[in-house]
Amino acid sequence: MGRLVRAREEERRKIAADIHDDSIQAMTVVSMRLQQLRKHMTTSEQKELIARIDEAVVESITRLRELMFDLRPPALDRAGLGAALRELLDRMRAETDIEFSLDDRLSREPSSAVQVELYRIAQEAIANVRKHSKAGLVKVDLQRVQQGYRIRVIDDGVGFDVAIHTEERGHIGLLDMNERAMIAGGWWTIESHVGGGTEVEFWLPDERAGDAAGG
């Protein structure tokens, strides 16, 4: 699993670096030239047209930066799993007004491969909250448990019928989370009821977890 995760994350890093060093830099230059061009326009219509084009370029740069974040959040390498999830949740709150609480009880970071898989599964669970839950609050907690790490993502949203939802053709989010956990040697569960919110819980083993007490 470690080799698979490292290869996948290295590819993500390369793509993110290419976006930053190539696409974003090129589009930033375009934006600067548009701003210079606007100064030479003689009519208000011309200036407005250049301004709209520049706004579209700036919006595209913002979306590329968001894509870079999703590919490889800087906080994951810089400050660890809890910090990366807090940054993700901060973005969610800013864009959707969904409030959150994060209970990070990790006294040490998981090994690199496990850290990445924990983040990716949590990222998908939080994305589902954003897209589907209509929640006002999501709670996330991280804890060392029984030679591994457990994460819970609980929202107070509208909930859904799990049996029907997982059978929907083309829906891969839930299956992807479950498969990631199983490949890593762990487990993943979901509980939800219409009108009763949703709870996603998963655990991945890690030799570095030591003799953590069960929960």
Image (cartoon, rainbow, N blue to C red):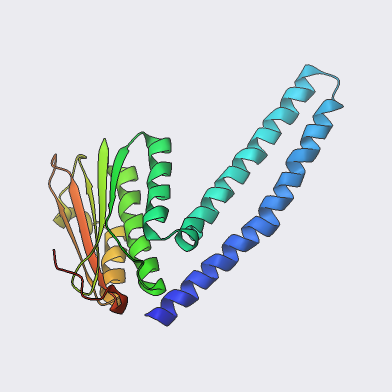
Q: Is residue 46 left or right of residue 158?
A: right
Task: Kindly identify the residue that appears in the image at 66 percent across and 40 percent down.
Answer: 57
Task: Kindly identify the residue that appears in the image at 36 percent across and 66 percent down.
Answer: 109
In front of the other: 154 or 211:
211
Q: Is residue 89 left or right of residue 174?
A: right
State which quadrant residue 104 falls in: bottom left
Residue 170 seen anywhere in this rendered image of the structure: no
Q: Residue furthest top?
A: 44
In the rendered image, which quarter contains the N terminus? bottom left
Task: Kindly identify the residue that appears in the image at 36 percent across and 56 percent down.
Answer: 82
Residue 113: image location, x then y, percent: 39, 73
Residue 125 position (above or below residue 144)? above
Residue 163 seen anywhere in this rendered image of the structure: yes
Q: Is residue 213 left or right of residue 32?
A: left
Q: Is residue 205 left or right of residue 97?
A: left
Residue 73: image location, x then y, percent: 48, 57
Residue 22: image location, x then y, percent: 70, 58
Q: How many discs appear?
A: 0
Task: Kindly identify the residue that appears in the image at 27 percent across and 73 percent down.
Answer: 209
